[in-house]
Image (cartoon, rainbow, N blue to C red):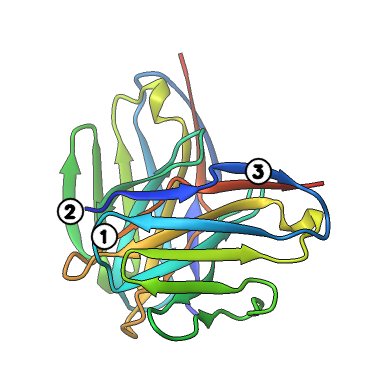
Amino acid sequence: SAVISQKPSRDICQRGTSLTIQCQVDSQVTMMFWYRQQPGQSLTLIATANQGSEATYESGFVIDKFPISRPNLTFSTLTVSNMSPEDSSIYLCSVDIANADTQYFGPGTRLTVL
Amino acid sequence: GIQVEQSPPDLILQEGANSTLRCNFSDSVNNLQWFHQNPWGQLINLFYIPSGTKQNGRLSATTVATERYSLLYISSSQTTDSGVYFCAVDKMDSSYKLIFGSGTRLLVRP
């Protein structure tokens, strides 16, 4: 398994500002992902965070709104830019452990935008 | 794309009762996982089960890959079982991207 931490655990932000969420894993992993869970909804994949190259975004998500960094195999950040109340969600990072075929999720960042 | 449907959407049980949650998926998959999201939002891995049957305490799961469905059984339910249960699959494209069902919201009453 993997131990995954996220910072911050929650935040309340003003409209128009940006927030950067950090994800730290206790071991080197190849695959890291960012998901969004809107209130009362299921999880939706935002992007795959690729080490050493640009993230791969899913349909409906763009780099200008959700820039992602992956400087090494244990760390990634997701920025939610120019926030609006519609961005209020839980943001979760996950990792896929090589040869384990199982994804593990961080505790999530609960974001409220006023 | 692949569709993942879960049923029932909501379930209320009395403590001690048993239940079965279902997950249907529309295409062949590499990976199927069951998660429990507790009231604090934490996603907890329950099973990795692309096929076959597994048991872990009061929980067990069965996936029939040829018929594209999976079942999660909860026996002797407890109030701590409350939360949302998600089924998630990934396509057979080596991307490891998980596609989540809409979840089953379970409330176990004392």
Label 1 packing within 10 angstroms: few (<14), some (14-19), many (20+): many
Residue B25 occupies quadrant: bottom left
Q: Secondary structure at mark 3?
A: strand
Q: CA distance from mark 2 to mark 1?
A: 7 Å
User: Label 1 amino acid?
Assistant: Thr
Question: Do callouts 1 and 3 mark residues in contact (Cβ within 8 Å)?
Answer: no
Task: From the top left corner, tell me how far across and down residue A44 is, in percent.
Answer: 55, 64
Label 3 packing within 10 angstroms: few (<14), some (14-19), many (20+): few
User: What residue lies at 20% left-to-right and 70% top-to-bottom?
Assistant: A98
User: Label 2 amino acid?
Assistant: Thr
Residue A11, label in figure: 3
| Residue A46 placement, left or right of B77 | right
Q: Nearer the viewer, residue B76 or B30?
A: B30
Task: From the top left corner, tell me how far across and down residue A43 is, in percent.
Answer: 54, 58
Chain letter of the residue carrying label 1:
B
The residue at which mark 1 appears reads as: B63
Residue lying at the far front of the rendered structure:
A71
Q: CA distance from mark 3 to mark 2?
A: 41 Å
User: What residue lies at 16% left-to-right and 70% top-to-bottom?
Assistant: A99
Q: Are the residues flagged by discs 3 and 2 from a single subunit?
A: no
Residue B1, label in figure: none
Chain letter of the residue carrying label 2:
B
